[in-house]
């Protein structure tokens, strides 16, 4: 079990098996809940912005080029460095003007301590979402991913995530991909472990065999 898991996976499995046999079957098929490990919060949000609407390989290449311009492709540039960078420099690394503006806004929020990373663990889920979405380029989906994987919150249901929606469609043999409202209704019974069940929805579509 991941070292940083902040709740009992055993309790989550027990609850999910009891309230939803479909998720119980996915647990049996895919094994333990193993979310990706958390990183430093500021670095995670920079990565979130860079990876938006891009395939993973392309985004990773842009990230490496951008970070290398600041001396180390493994080090996230500081807020001060981003604020001192002009659009042409960003563009040379493959970062669009819009994403450059998002990175600068994140930098400003970080320097002005509008994002209180030191105490963010103490915030409720709704408070985290409110704080993060004040940054340009950080929407509800990004905030949900931060809650699930950065803060390890157990009861997050990213109803707008296409992977979760597709996982529901496949797992429950639905006639169409559920919209956010229907996804929320499907996942309501999973609480207080909606993060775990959502993770299994992603696993479900990884193993779908095309017709």
Image: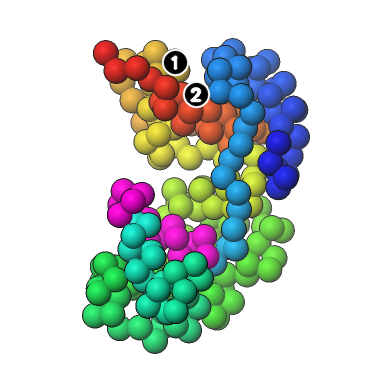
Quarter of the image for residue 211 reads top left
Relative image position of residue 167 (x, y in whole percent): 42, 26
Where is the N terminus found, in terms of image quarters?
top right
Dot placed on the residue nearer the N-terminal end, 1 or 2:
1
| The label number, if any, that marks residue 68 in the structure image | none
- CA separation, marks 1 and 2? 9 Å
> Would you call the spot at circle 1 few (<14 residues within 10 Å), some (14-19), or many (20 or more)?
few
Residue 52 inside the magenta-drawn segment: yes
Region of the chain picked out in magenta, as a range: 43-58
Relative image position of residue 73 (x, y in whole percent): 44, 69
Question: For the stretch drawn in magenta, what is the main secondary structure?
Answer: helix
Q: Which residue is mark 1?
A: 172
Asked if residue 91 shows in the view, the reply is yes
Residue 200 inside the magenta-drawn segment: no
Relative image position of residue 204 (x, y in whole percent): 46, 24
- Secondary structure under tag 2 reads helix
Image point 34% across, 17% down: which residue? 209
């Amino acid at each position: 079990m991941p070292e940083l898991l902040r709740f009992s996976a055993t309790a989550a499995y027990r609850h999910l098996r009891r309230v939803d046999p479909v998720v119980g079957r996915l647990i049996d098929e895919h094994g333990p809940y193993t979310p990706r490990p958390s990183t430093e919060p500021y670095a995670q949000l920079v990565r979130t912005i860079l990876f938006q609407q891009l395939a993973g390989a392309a985004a990773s290449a842009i990230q490496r080029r951008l970070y290398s311009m600041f001396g180390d492709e493994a080090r996230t540039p500081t807020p001060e460095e981003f604020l001192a960078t002009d659009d042409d420099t960003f563009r040379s690394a493959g970062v669009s003007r819009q994403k450059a503006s998002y990175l600068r806004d994140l930098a400003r929020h970080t320097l002005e301590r509008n994002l209180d990373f030191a105490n963010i663990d103490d915030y409720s889920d709704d408070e985290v979402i409110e704080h993060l979405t004040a940054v340009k380029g950080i929407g509800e989906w990004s905030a949900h991913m931060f809650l699930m994987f950065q803060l390890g919150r157990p009861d997050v249901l990213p109803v707008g995530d296409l992977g979760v929606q597709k996982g529901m469609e496949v797992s429950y043999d639905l006639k169409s991909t559920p919209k956010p409202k229907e996804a929320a209704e499907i996942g309501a019974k999973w609480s207080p472990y909606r993060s775990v069940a959502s993770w299994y929805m992603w696993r479900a579509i990884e193993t779908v065999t095309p017709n």
